[in-house]
């Protein structure tokens, strides 16, 4: 009986110890398709680079970019347009921290900031402006 209990404990421990999916890239793609970006980022951040062939930085870049696009164009219906655009800008900033040459993130930032420029009383906030300026934008 002790052996059975010990075996069960080991199996339970091994079964619950790894939250990393077997194929990280496929799991992240599936989560992106389901608009589950937070979970995708959690998988990536908790991944052990030694136990996956996935390019974790590319997966992060892809997830942040898709998250930004989701927020900008389809985002949660219960949030304001300003909140969605600010959150999208935050995601695009994360993309550019990983890959400063990501043209899609840059063009989306320029589009959002172009809209903000037509509304003199509106701004995405000082923190966003500071981060954008660090990335080479001039706002």
Image (cartoon, rainbow, N blue to C red):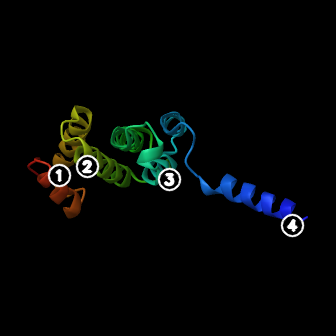
Q: Earlier in the sequence, mark 3 or mark 1?
A: 3
Q: Residue furthest right?
A: 1
Which residue sits at x=43%, y=36%? 53
Q: Nearer the viewer, mark 4 or mark 3?
A: 4
**As displayed, is residue 100 above or below residue 19?**
above
Instruction: Out of 97 and 22, give the one closest to the viewer.
Output: 22
Q: Is residue 17 left or right of residue 79?
A: right
Tell me the SS state at disc 1. Answer: helix
C-beta proximity under 8 Å, tags 1 and 2: yes
Secondary structure beneath dot 3 equals loop
Q: Earlier in the sequence, mark 1 or mark 2?
A: 2
Q: Nearer the viewer, residue 102 or 35?
A: 102
Q: Which mark is residue 93?
A: 2
Question: Circles 3 and 1: CB distance less than 8 Å?
Answer: no
- State the CA–CA distance, disc 3 to disc 1: 27 Å
Q: CA distance from mark 1 to mark 2?
A: 7 Å
Instruction: State the mark number for residue 2.
Output: 4
Q: Earlier in the sequence, mark 4 or mark 1?
A: 4
């Amino acid at each position: 009986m002790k052996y059975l209990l010990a075996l069960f404990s080991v199996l339970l421990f091994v079964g619950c110890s790894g939250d990393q999916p077997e194929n990280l890239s496929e799991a992240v793609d599936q989560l992106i398709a389901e608009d589950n970006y937070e979970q995708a980022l959690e998988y990536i951040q908790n991944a052990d680079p030694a136990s996956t062939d996935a390019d974790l930085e590319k997966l992060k870049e892809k997830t942040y970019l898709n998250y930004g696009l989701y927020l900008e164009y389809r985002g949660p219906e219960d949030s304001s347009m300003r909140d969605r655009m600010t959150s999208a800008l935050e995601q695009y900033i994360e993309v550019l921290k990983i890959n400063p040459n990501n043209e899609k993130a840059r063009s989306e930032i320029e589009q959002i900031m172009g809209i903000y420029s037509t509304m003199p009383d509106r701004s995405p906030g000082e923190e966003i402006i500071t981060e954008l300026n660090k990335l080479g934008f001039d706002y």
